[in-house]
Image: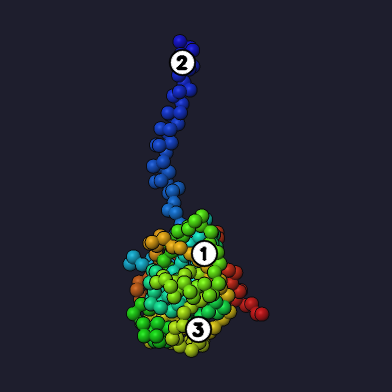
Amino acid sequence: MHRFRASRCPLLLPALLVLAALLYLPAAANAGTLRRPPPAVELDVVDRHSGAILPQYRHAGRTWLPGEPGHAYALRLRNTGPQRLLVVLSVDGINAIDGRTADLRQAGYVLEPWQTLEVAGWRKSLDAVAQFVFVDPGASYAARTGRPDNLGVIGIAVFAERAPYGGIARVATPGDARRERAAAPAPASAQAGMEAEDVASPEAGGYPQRALPSTRLGTGHGSIEHAPALQARFQREAGPLQVTELRYESRFGLQTRGIRLDHGRPLADAPRAFPGSFVPDPPDWRD
């Protein structure tokens, strides 16, 4: 009898452990230990005057952030995974690379695995961008080019790569990209940007800070600055794996919508040890 019991006990232990694990999983989920995975690409808006990431507020099923009139801003894109991704970037309903009315099939920025990229403006060439600036709606690039219908929204569409023949992507030359655009309906993508097609646009220049006649904001075509980029091949999957929209308005505009601003932080946002921002200057700092 003793031998029989000794031989059966090891066989029962694995079953008991499996049962215990199955019983533990719902409790762990209820305790909040299971988290939703992060998005493929995180999108933040950085105020370039302060270096701070603008807070985001959930309200009425949408995500809002406060813009400061006259302030330049940058869009920070962070690839959270190990695969190469294409990000089609729309500002006020306009593609930030080629200036056309935004569409999912257009050119975008290619992010390498885990890469963080800051896009500071409308791409004018492989060497320069015109700064993104929060401005009065009438002074926005969209309004000045006759397309004011989608002011106040920033969006990204993220595509995974369809790896051809082993998935090796080479850096293309500007001549290669021009020939591809002439031969194919979908333009080639850029590794850190793509040469913009010639688009009729307002003359570059800064926008002065001034009182807004409304609570709305748009994005202006600001001063030209150096921002080098490379071109690269990228074969995207048929559909996006992520589409994200951020809506922006003046701080007063958000308050009139009933969004409570608590010293620039969302009330429901918990403190983070690694918020992902650059170090801002102290209030009394002088160069």
> Mark 1 sits on what residue?
111
Residue at the image point whose x is 38% and y is 77% from the top: 101
Can you see residue 277? no
The quadrant the C terminus occupies is: bottom right
Q: CA distance from mark 1 to mark 3?
A: 25 Å
What's under tag 2, amino acid-wise? Arg
Which quadrant of the figure has residue 106? bottom left
Q: CA distance from mark 2 to mark 1?
A: 61 Å
x then y, percent, for residue 210: 46, 88
| Lower sequence index among marks 1 and 3 | 1
In the picture, the disc for residue 5 is 2
Q: Is residue 188 above or below residue 210?
A: above
What's under tag 3, amino acid-wise? Gly
What is the number of callouts on the image? Answer: 3
Pointer 3 with pointer 2, Cβ within 8 A: no
Of tags 3 and 2, which is closer to the observer? 3
Q: CA distance from mark 3 to mark 2?
A: 82 Å
> Mark 3 sits on what residue?
222
Q: Is residue 6 left or right of 105 when viewed as pictured?
A: right
Q: Which secondary structure, mark 1?
A: strand
Q: Nearer the viewer, residue 258 or 189?
A: 189
x then y, percent, for residue 112: 54, 62
Q: Which secondary structure, mark 3?
A: strand
Q: Nearer the viewer, residue 86 or 225?
A: 86
**Which class describes the residues within 10 Å of circle 2: few (<14), some (14-19), or many (20+)?**
few
Q: Nearer the viewer, residue 262 or 96?
A: 96
The quadrant the N terminus occupies is: top left
What's under tag 1, amino acid-wise? Leu
Residue at the image point whose x is 38% and y is 61% from the top: 238
Q: Is residue 57 above or below residue 207?
A: above
Residue at the image point whose x is 60% and y is 69% from the top: 279
Q: How is the image coloured?
A: rainbow
